[in-house]
Every structure is written in structure tokens, then in C-alpha cells.
């Protein structure tokens, strides 16, 4: 049994760091992950803006200066991997190296510097990895994945674990900028002609368009800041299709430097925003999706997901991430699982309707319920809320993220909203807010009863029986009854409209 002390060598937190070096058309990036896992956690992330794809569409060759920048970045990245003790380094290259006449020569130099093989991705392979990235990071994906890079756009249909045939277009920001002679009007015609009859877009109506790539994330960040959105987490940010269409038309219509918060987009990225907006506009007009889902998961995460065995791929990434935080930061990780089983019995007896997704969120919340215990008691709720709201969780949308943060806030602070920003509550429905308050109140009973230690909750059921909320403390548990336990039980009873009793 593991209580306050945790060993760093436990299965959940051990493992050698792994890294992916992504040689893209716009930038070269290194991401080092804590280990190969179902919910991989980045521990280092750096990119170098090299613009390898610039001029490829017009000259057919990689620019000499861009190559020099890229190779210098790779030398640094390889050195960083050595210093960090990275076990496995995967190196991939995309459209610029794929399309350039001197791409083979460049790849050979990359291979020598990185001291490992470099996988030159075909367009279809890139589309497949992007789709795998979505499958790995989105719970029950259903729609079309679009990965917009500097040199190309890849599209692939996803439904659950199934991936349809991928396709690639030379519609990346840099490529489109050059092919159109820096004219958005000409770019518009190029994109329209290329996408007009793609079968993937014909089957997108009413589904989700999953937007992958730095240019689309930059557009989403602008949208997020312009509407004063309270949660600045990119993965899982959803824009209704109609609103997204209006926004990309705005991007095309006005000078970039007049946009509110344009300073949040790098100077290198800003000239490409208009071309990204053109591509997204045509996808929305042709495909007519329900919404645009912004993903931080893409080719790199798809590559890692592909390395997992079949059993690991089936693991829920949200539960995996919550279990790791539970293992690392809770007084007793076992207690988190006991709390889930204990609230299972309560919910089943209460008559409160709970969907599969809501039960999944409750499981994650129980695992996260004690991660703030080391903070000062007055700030445990606030710190837990901030940690959960901004954690690098995947398999989770923003309403779900807000539910988790609110439930743990209520678990620490009680049902007191005075110090809670009303903006975070705006992200959840009335139903989810009610569930967060009920779960927080139930957790408060569970923690005051058990002192966060395992072994008590399994033999102290809390259920609704014959219209009453009953907490049973039999035999040697009877001394645990007290005014604080009863008081918290009454609070929960008021939330669900039940009288309460402690049975000893």
C-alpha cells in the first residue's frame, strides 16, 4: 500500500525520455517527451523557423540559407537529446524535403547529424500520422483531419479508430504564397480548384473538422483572444463552423496588423495567416462541418501512438494522465480509485442520470481530487483549479476540462462561488455545473471520513435508500461519525433533495 511517499521508479512515472525531430517546411522542431506512453507529456519543446519550403514551389530546390539554418538547428537538437539522456529519437521530414530536387542530399546531411534514420514522409503517410494524432488525442473522433503545414495540406477521414485514405495538396502556407505570387485572390482560385471535388470533404457535412498545424492554431489563438475566451488552452478549442467562416473572412478582408492581439502571433507566422484563412474558408464552404476542433496533436503524436501496442492504444488518455498525476501528487493514489468506486455506488442509487462521458469525467476527477493537498489550505481549491484547467490533458474538450477543475475546486472550498471567476463556469452547461457541485460535495464527505487514506471508503457505503441519503459506519467505523461528517452529508443531501442519516 502506498501512502504519502512515492518512489520515482513506479510503473506509472518511470521510463526513458523519447524525442521526435520534425523537419517541416516552415520550421524544424524538437519535442522531448517524458517517456513513450498513452498520454505523452512533453518535457522540452523548441522550434527553429527555417522556412525550408520557401522557393521550393518556384525553383524546385531547397534554399541554401534555409538548409544551413536547419542543419544548425539539428546539431543543437541532437546535442540536447544527448544531454537529456533521450533513449530513442525519431526524425521525420515532410513536404519541403519531399518535393525538392536536392531533398535527398539534405536528408543525407540530416541523417549524419542526427545519427539515426530520417523518415521522409509521403503525403499519404503524413496524412495517416496526422489522423493517428487525432485518434490518440480526441475521445471518439468523427470527422476529417486537415494538417496544414508550410508546404502541403493533408486530409484524412477518421471515425473512431478507422482512418480513410489520405490525400495531400500543395496548399501549405509557404507553397501557396509562392504559387499565387503573394496574391490572396489568386490563392483563392488555386485552393478552390484543388479542393472542389475531394471526396473527404463531401462526407464532412455535420461532422467535425480537426484542424492541425501552426498556422491554424495561430488563427484560433487570435479568435480566442478576440472573444475574451477564459481558457487559453489550444487543444480542444472548438469554434462553430459558421463563426469560424465569418472569422476567416475577416482575416482575409482586413490588414493583419489591424487585428486585435496580433502580437500573440510570431512575426514569421503572420504573413501566412491569410493563406491559412483561404484554405480553411474553402474547407468550411465545401464540407459544411458542424464545427472546427483545434488540435495540438498531429504527426509527432501520431508517430508515438503508432509505437504503442494494441492494448496500450485502447487506454483512455485522460484516465491515464489523471492516474499519473494521482500517482505523483496524491497522499494515497489507491484512495483515488476507491473514491471512484465509492461515488459509483452513490450515483447508481441516487437516481441522478449520468452519461458514459459524465462517468468518465467523474473517474478522472476522483483521480485528481487530492493533487493539491500540499498547498496552503486556503489556496488548495484555487491551485487545483488552475493546475487542472491548464494541464496538458488530451482526450478532453474544454467543457470537460472546466468540469474537472470546478469539481476539485468545490471538493476543497465547499460550494462557495464568491472567489471563483464566473468565466470558468461559462464553459460548462447547467447540467455539468450541477454534476460538478454534487461530485465536489460527495468528495468532501469522502475525504473528511477517510482522511485521504485507503481502506475506509470500500466499507463505508454512501447510498440513497428509500428516499434518504445514508452513510453506513458499522462496527469499528462507528467512532468516525461526527458533526463535520454529518454537516458535509447534509450539504450533499440538500443538493440532491434528500434527507440524510448516518447509520452506525
Image (cartoon, rainbow, N blue to C red):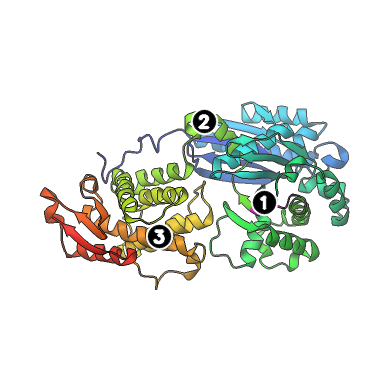
Between disc 2 and disc 3, the foreground one is 3
Q: Residue at x 30, y 49 (%)?
A: 345
3D distance between C-alphas at marks 3 and 1: 30 Å
Which mark, residue 436? 3
Q: Is residue 479 left or right of residue 256?
A: left
User: Which of pointers 3 and 1 indicates the residue nearer the eye?
Assistant: 1
Q: Which residue position is annotated with label 2?
A: 308
Between discs 1 and 2, the one toward the N terminus: 1
Quadrant of residue 381 within the rendered picture? bottom left
Of residues 25 and 189, the one nearer the viewer is: 189
Between 504 and 117, the one nearer to me in the picture:
504
Counting from the top left corner in percent of width and height, residue 313 is at: 51, 34
Q: Residue at x 84, y 49 (%)?
A: 192
Q: Residue 384: x percent and y percent?
A: 39, 58
Q: Earlier in the sequence, mark 2 or mark 3?
A: 2
Q: Quadrant of the N terminus?
A: top left
* Number of residues whose C-alpha sits closer than 10 Å to that of mark 2, classed few (under 14), some (14–19) or many (20 or more): some
Amino acid at each position: 500500500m502506498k501512502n504519502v511517499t512515492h518512489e520515482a521508479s513506479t510503473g506509472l512515472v518511470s521510463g526513458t525520455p523519447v524525442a521526435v525531430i520534425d523537419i517541416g517546411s516552415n520550421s524544424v522542431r524538437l519535442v522531448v517527451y517524458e517517456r513513450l506512453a498513452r498520454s505523452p507529456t512533453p518535457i522540452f519543446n523548441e522550434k527553429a523557423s527555417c522556412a525550408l519550403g520557401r522557393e521550393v514551389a518556384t525553383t524546385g530546390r531547397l534554399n541554401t540559407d534555409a538548409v544551413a539554418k536547419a542543419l544548425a538547428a539539428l546539431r543543437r537538437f541532437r546535442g540536447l537529446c544527448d544531454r537529456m539522456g533521450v533513449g530513442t529519437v525519431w526524425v521525420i521530414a515532410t513536404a519541403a524535403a519531399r518535393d525538392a530536387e536536392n531533398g535527398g542530399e539534405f536528408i543525407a546531411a540530416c541523417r549524419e547529424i542526427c545519427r539515426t534514420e530520417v523518415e521522409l514522409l509521403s503525403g499519404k503517410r503524413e496524412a495517416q500520422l496526422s489522423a493517428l494524432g487525432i485518434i490518440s488525442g480526441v475521445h471518439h473522433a468523427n470527422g476529417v483531419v486537415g494538417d496544414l503545414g508550410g508546404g502541403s495540406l493533408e486530409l484524412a477521414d477518421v471515425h473512431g479508430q478507422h482512418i480513410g485514405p489520405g490525400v495531400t495538396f500543395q496548399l501549405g502556407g509557404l507553397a501557396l504564397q509562392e504559387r499565387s505570387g503573394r496574391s490572396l485572390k489568386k490563392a483563392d482560385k488555386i485552393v478552390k480548384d484543388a479542393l472542389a471535388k475531394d471526396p473527404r470533404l463531401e462526407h464532412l457535412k455535420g461532422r467535425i473538422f480537426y484542424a492541425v498545424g501552426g498556422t491554424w492554431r495561430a488563427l484560433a489563438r487570435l479568435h480566442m483572444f478576440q472573444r475574451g475566451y477564459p481558457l487559453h488552452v489550444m487543444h480542444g478549442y472548438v469554434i462553430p463552423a459558421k463563426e469560424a467562416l465569418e472569422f476567416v473572412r475577416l482575416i482575409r478582408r482586413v490588414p493583419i496588423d489591424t487585428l486585435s492581439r496580433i502580437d500573440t502571433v510570431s512575426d514569421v507566422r503572420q504573413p501566412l495567416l491569410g493563406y491559412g484563412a483561404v484554405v480553411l474558408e474553402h474547407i468550411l464552404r465545401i464540407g459544411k462541418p458542424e464545427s472546427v476542433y483545434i488540435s495540438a496533436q498531429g504527426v509527432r503524436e501520431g508517430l508515438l501512438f503508432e509505437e504503442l501496442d494494441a492494448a496500450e492504444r485502447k487506454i483512455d488518455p485522460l484516465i491515464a494522465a489523471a492516474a499519473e498525476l494521482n500517482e505523483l501528487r496524491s497522499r494515497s493514489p489507491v484512495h483515488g480509485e476507491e473514491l471512484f468506486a465509492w461515488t459509483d455506488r452513490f450515483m447508481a442509487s441516487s437516481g441522478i442520470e449520468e452519461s458514459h462521458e459524465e462517468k468518465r469525467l467523474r473517474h478522472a476527477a476522483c483521480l485528481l481530487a487530492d493533487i493539491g493537498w500540499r498547498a496552503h489550505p486556503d489556496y488548495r481549491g484555487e491551485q487545483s483549479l488552475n493546475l487542472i484547467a491548464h494541464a496538458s490533458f488530451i482526450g478532453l474538450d474544454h467543457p470537460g476540462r472546466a468540469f474537472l477543475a470546478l469539481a476539485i475546486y468545490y471538493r476543497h472550498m465547499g460550494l462557495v462561488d464568491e472567489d471563483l471567476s464566473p468565466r470558468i463556469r461559462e464553459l460548462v452547461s447547467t447540467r455539468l455545473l450541477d454534476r460538478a457541485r454534487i461530485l465536489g460535495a460527495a468528495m468532501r464527505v469522502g475525504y473528511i471520513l477517510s482522511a485521504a487514506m485507503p481502506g475506509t471508503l470500500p466499507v463505508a457505503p454512501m447510498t440513497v435508500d428509500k428516499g434518504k441519503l445514508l452513510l453506513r459506519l458499522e462496527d469499528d467505523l462507528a467512532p468516525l461519525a461526527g458533526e463535520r461528517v454529518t454537516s458535509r452529508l447534509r450539504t450533499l443531501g440538500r443538493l440532491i433533495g434528500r434527507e440524510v442519516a448516518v447509520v452506525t
